[in-house]
Structures are given as C-alpha cells and as structure tokens.
Image (cartoon, grey):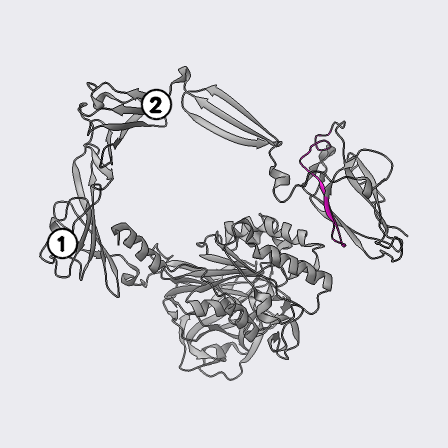
Amino acid sequence: MTSIIVPPVDLAPGLPSRVVTISATDVTEGGTSMAGATVAFALSSTLDASGGVVVARTSALITLDAQGKGQIRLPVYDTAASQTWCNDDNWAIIVSTSWGDRKAVRVPAGTTSIPLSSLPPVRPLRGRELQWAITGVSVSVTEGAQWDASVSLSGGVLDFDFIVPPGGTAFWKGSLDPSVDLDTVTTPGLYGVWSGSPNAPGSGLLLVSEVRTTGGVVSQVNHVFYLTGSSPQIMMRFRGSVWAAWTWVGGKDAMRVQQWGNTGDLNDATAPGVYPYWSGTANAPGGSGVVVTSELRTNAGTLSQVQQIAFTTGSNPEIHMRFRGSVWAAWTRMDAGAIVIPPSEGGGGAAFRRVPLALTTATATGEESVGGGAIRFPLDYAPRVGRWRLHIRNHNYASNTSYQSGGQVTGVWIGPGWGGAFTTAPSQVSGALTIPTDGSEVVTPWINAPFGDGVQQMLSVGWSAPTDTPHVLVPGGGWRSTSAASASAASGAGFSATAWIPFDWWIEAEAAPDVPTKAGWGNSITAGTGTTLIVNDSWLSQHCRATGALPIHWAYPGSGMSLWMNPQDPKWSRWADFPKADVVIHAMGQNDLGTAASAQVMRDRFETTLPMVREHISPTVVVSTITPHAGKTEAQNAIRRQHATYLKSLPLGVRDCFDFAAAVSNDDVALRPEFRGGPAGTDELHPNTAGAAAMAAAITRPIVASPAADALAAYESAIGA
C-alpha cells in the first residue's frame, strides 16, 4: 500500500490544499527498490487560515513503500484566493530527501493530485530570510513638531517614516557673523563660528541642542564647540538660568597628564587631569600609582566638589576614592580586596555577585515515600563563597509540577570532609525548617559560613516527611542515611553514596564581583549522570574547578532543544532574578536526535532557542559537539555529524566551538570503553567521571576574560602606557 499522510477528516476546512504524490526509482531505473527511503516536508513559517485556524510551522516525514511511492496533502499557493496566506510569497515548503536532495516548493491550486516532480523549486530562501525577506521599500515624510524617524517591516516591504519640523528647516545653520554673541545662539542646529566672536573659545563648529520638560518647556540649552586648528579641542557648556563656563571635554588638554616626583602633595592636584605619582608623595593612599581628578559644578558653573580616584600599582593593586568639599575627606578603599562580608541578613549588595549553585538537577525522574533521613552534599568549588542560603522545594522544574507533600528540615550542618564523613565535627548553621505542602519553596536565613577556596567540604541536612504522600526524587550526587539524627555526626557511619535525592536543593551564593561564572545548558550529560557524584563530577563542575569559576547548571536530564522552544516556558524563569553568567556552554542536542528527521530540524531548533539562551542565561555563547552514543542509528549519527559541522561554522555570533565528541570517542560512533558511565561502566550514553574530565579538558581556549586583566588593560590604555 502506498505510504500516505492524508487525514481522513479535513482538519482545516478553510484551508485550500492538494495531494502531492511521490514516485521514486534509483539510477538503474527500477533495478533496486526505493522502499524505506524518506521525504521530509517542512513549512517555513506559520500560516493563518480562515476561521481562526493556524497551520503550524511543523514538518512531516513520508516513508516510501515497496514501489517507492507515497502521498501527502499540502497547503497550496493560490494568487486568486481571497485568503492572504494563499498568495503571500513569504513562505515555502522545504522538501528534503534521504538521498540528499533539498528544495523549496509551493503547490499550485487544484483539486487533483500532482506529482512532486512537477513542482519546480522556488527561489531558495534560507534561515531567517523566509521570515525577514525584503521585497520592497517605501518612504514617507510628514511634518511634525520635532525631528523623528522610524522603520518597520510589513509583508516584506521596508517602510521608512520621517518626521521633520515645518518649513524645511535644515540642521546646518551656516556660518555666524563674527559680531554674533554665542550667548544669544539658542536655536538647535550646527553653526560655523569665527575667531573673535563674543563668548566663543575660538574658530570652529558650534552644536546647539536643548533639553525640554515633559510639558515641552525648554529647561536647558547645551553648547558643544569643536575648536579647529593645529590642536583641535572639544569644549562644552550649558545654560540653565545663566551660561556656565566653557569646560574642556576632549583633546590633549581635556585630561592633563602631569608626572610628579615624590615631593608633591595630592591635595594640590585639584585641576581635572591624570597624575602619576611616586611612593612617598604626600596624601597619597600608599605606594606609587595614578590619580584621576575630576570636579563637580553647580548649574551656575560654580565649583562644588573635587573628586579623586587613585589606582595604586604593584603586585596587589588597589583602588581608593575621596572628595573635597571645604576640606579633603579621608581615602576610602573601593576594590574587591576591601570587601568584608557583613553578618547581617538580607540580600547581597553591589559588591557581591549572586550565583545559583545546584546541588541536584531540576528534573524529577521518580518519586519516593521514605519517612526521612540525612543527606550530605559535596561542596567542591575553586572560588570562595562567603555568604549563602539554602533553597529547598518539592517540585519538578522540568514539568513545572509541584508535589502536594511537605516535610521538615531538622537542621543544616557544614564542615570539611568527603565520602560521607567529616574530618572534624560539623558546625550547625541552620535550625528546623518546614517544607511547604503546596510545593512552594523554603529558604534558610543567610548563613555566614564560607566554603570553596579549593577545600572539599560537605553540607549535611536532616529531614523527615510523611510516608502517605510521595515526594519528588531527583538525580543528585551525595551520601544518604536513613537516620535524620545522623546529620550532625562527624562519622560517616550509615551513609552510602547515592545518585538520587529527595526534593530539589540549591544554594544562593555570594562571591566576589570578579569571580567568573560559567553556565552549562544541556541534558543529563551536562548534569553529570553517569559520573560518581552527579552535578559535582559533571564536565561543567570539573571545568570550573580547573579555571577558578563557579558553575551554573541549566541541566535538565531528558531534555532537548525541542522542549525549550516556548519563550514563556517557566523553565526559563527559574533564576531570572540572578545576574547572567559570563558565558554559557550550549551542550543541548543529544535527546533531539531521537525526534529530528534531518540536520535542518536540528538547525531550526538551535536557531529558535539561541536568542532565549542569550536572554535568560548569558549573551555570550559557546557551543560543543554532541557526544556519540552506540544506541543511535547511522541515520541519527549522520544528522549529529552534520549538526557538528554547522556548529563549527560558529553561526549567529557563537564565539567558539569545542569538540566533546572527539574527546570521548575514537570512532565517532560510541564512547571509548574507559569513559562509559555508571557503576559497572556499561552506560553507553553517559560518560563517567573520567569521560566528563576529558570533556572539560576539551575546552582548550579561554571563554571568559579575566576581570583583573581587563581592568588593568583599560587603565593602561587610559594613561597611554
């Protein structure tokens, strides 16, 4: 029987459509059957039919029968139809065959079936061109009170709309007569000015602008003067009630650089400029360095305050700041080395960087009704975390499901140790907490008990829960005991390693502002499934420990790009109130191979989700190739390799690509035996801890700049070093 995709019931009666037939034979003209060959049809964009019906931007796959035949019903392109979508030339149907052909077609109107071979290809439209192709341009100019302009794209036509003041007034006003006083020039525009004009700093160009209130009243007039000659300068002044004095804002004299010895006094460096100074200079904050002096003036131009910022040089550079009103204030150190974490509760200030540190993954893969016990989480981070609080929730973030079962946290302890046992008695940092029965979150108070700095510690939690209602069970590495009372013990007696943790746990951490953060957006492989300690031994955690960064795990086991296509999905908003990561490593795609019919589908999913990754995780994106899995078909492997080629082209502004596949496989088909995950080493999908380490080591180029190095480079550029 011919393979066919033609619904028995017309799902869109107002949608003109037509049956397209496929008949294929091989090059020997019938000598070999084309049975099993496939033809994929994908709509380039959503179509709006009559009656409120939407034809979604989806795809369908035809498998040819023993005679190499198949059928499919497709929407038509009809210039005579009344529906706008029928003759809108901004869409096409992308046809891809398993034997390598690809073209964009449109089906002409008609009631009889039509062969696919009779459909000629339209002009090839690729990527976003299908949606944003420009087919025409229009320009409109109207009069208005103020200058304005806008541009829009509608139906392929780029519309430029300009609003100009009445009378055709030009912005260039011409050269002023030398007798004109610049104090009287208040009409916005650009003027030529001769030397000798009253209140002019010399010959040049005068740019006049104005500031108006919301009611349209002029509140301030601004003058910017471009002084011409052998030493061009830029000067600026403004008029509120009276004209302020001209101020240098650009040119060689705008920021004067004066080299001082060690006999000067920084109290005397009051003129705006840059002052390098030597150790021993009076009233310097210490050592040698550079002072930048600026001044603050009133609307009338009167000097109100002098400000100084000092950058000390040496092996431990510092930043200091002070000001002078009537007298000089004391220097205040402003760099990260001066930060002292306060013991008070509340959120971190601007001097800290808030980072979400996952202890478990966000995807529930089971339930349990155990009545309680103790959990010990590994804490192994290179940077120092000074202050933090613990978040607990009976919730599955992947499905946005809250479990209507609560429990109790009997206490929280922290201390040095590993493998389930503390090396010294742990310190209690939080008392009892109630886990809500409605699936909402409970959070400990802010805790001042630093961890990290390359020292392995553990977080120990006692808990209890009713046995008549289930609680979520999520992947996470650690050690569990059946006794809640054992949470406070130094001994590891009764604790055993686990890959499953009840409830969802994560830490809201405060770190120094220059600590880099690196996010991983991926599936169970990014979460660390298959390693000894899920999350802690993941490739992301290992890479961050090696580079002094904190990891942010946007890792959802079982997930793929196809499950993140909706920008309103609650998964995107989980950590919306946190600063974005410095970089995100895009490692999603393994699970998409099970549903993607072609490399183009993978590419479409990548291009759809990439803007959301940038919006919610980090604007800086690097990508990685998908690791091989012996359970995949050769067709899926071919799609994976084609997608890897696409990623290596660094599309859409991606900064770099790292080859995870080559790091864990010798044949690009299966994991190397020594990298197979699970306790028995038989997991062909998830790399073990050593495999995750190989993936981490594959990130061979820097993906986050050093904040300290960037600051020093900016400073040296400013002083011309």
Kindly identify the residue that appears in the image at 71 percent across and 35 percent down.
Answer: 52
Quadrant in the picture for residue 91: top right
The answer to whether 134 appears left or right of 10 in the picture is left
Foreground residue, 67 or 578? Answer: 67
- Report the Cα–Cα distance between label 2 and label 1: 45 Å
Question: Where does label 1 land, which residue?
Answer: 260
Foreground residue, 646 or 385? Answer: 646
Q: Main secondary structure of the magenta part?
A: loop
Q: Give the vertical position of 237 relative to 689 (above or below).
A: above
Q: Residue lying at the far left in this picture: please name it.
A: 263
Residue range in magenta is 83-103
Residue 424: percent from the left, percent from the top?
40, 82
* Residue 221 appears in the rendering: no
Q: Kindly identify which numbered label has been placed on residue 172.
A: 2
The image shows a total of numbered marks equal to: 2
Q: Residue lying at the far top in this picture: please name it.
A: 167
Residue 541: percent from the left, percent from the top?
49, 68
Kindly identify the residue that appears in the image at 25 percent across and 20 percent down.
Answer: 176
87 falls in the magenta region: yes
The C terminus - image quarter: bottom left
Foreground residue, 378 or 522? Answer: 522
The answer to whether 626 appears left or right of 196 in the picture is right
Residue 296: percent from the left, percent from the top?
21, 41
